[in-house]
Image: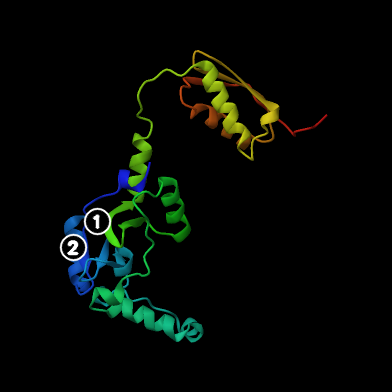
Amino acid sequence: MKARDVMVSPVITVRSSATVHEVARLLLEKRISAVPVVDDQGKLVGMVSEGDLLHRAEIGAERRRSHWLAIFDAQHVLASDFIKSHARKVADLMARPVIIAQPDTPLHELATMMERHGVKRIPIVRDGTLVGIVSRANLVQAVATGGVELDIPVSDNAIREELMKRLRHESWAQAARLNATVKNGVVNLWGEAESDTERKAIKVAAESTPGVFAVVDHITVGRLGAA
């Protein structure tokens, strides 16, 4: 699946000229945790989330650093804290640059991007124009519906070939020491794994192979190559 298959569109946005108070009200009214910021031409220029509003002077929650820590903090860090606490305009508060993706970006790449950059959502852009947004919740929704497929029978031989092919391509699997027999969609796993984790991974590979009805695990765990 691609970003275009799960993204939310149209996207609720806010102009960079909006005030912080206007953004706070928008987040509450729309029941969202973040909003993309666009310029007067509708181009994406930043992102504002609930996290950016946590340390605001209005609620007495400015980020406070001890005297000793303040001595060692760079001046630009202290100045940045002040801006986040006191800025009136979204343009001064928003996070940038923004991590973006294209509509045809695969979901597994979006998940990796979210994890690598520590973000919870990624705007989807086409030719510089914001066309959607994908959040962690959208990826979970894709997982929840990903198993809904047409009930097309798969032969036992095709199941076994697909499973063994997958195991041969996994660096953690000792495929030469593994075997599988399949009858009426029931997979029997045989062989030896180096650890319980590897054994579990092999079982998961079998369970997630299309056409599999059940898995019977006969794999033993022990040091590979031991006498």
Which mark is drawn over residue 193? none
Tell me, yes or no, whether the two marked residues, 1 and 2, touch with CB atoms within 8 Å.
Answer: yes
Could you tell me if residue 3 is visible in this image? yes
Q: Position of residue 118 (x, y in %)?
A: 43, 59
Q: Is residue 90 above or below residue 120?
A: below
Could you tell me if residue 60 is visible in this image? no
Query: Which residue is depicted at the point 50% across and 84% down?
Result: 68
User: In this view, which residue lies farthest toward the top?
Assistant: 184
Query: Which residue is depicted at the point 27% across and 61% down?
Result: 129
In the structure shown, which secondary structural element does the residue marked by tag 1 occupy?
loop
Quadrant in the picture for the N terminus = top left
User: In this view, which residue lies farthest toward the right?
Assistant: 227
Which mark is drawn over residue 32? 1
Q: Is residue 32 above or below residue 150?
A: below
Q: Amino acid at mark 1?
A: Ile
For residue 13, which quarter of the picture? bottom left
Name the one closer to the observer, 42 or 107: 42
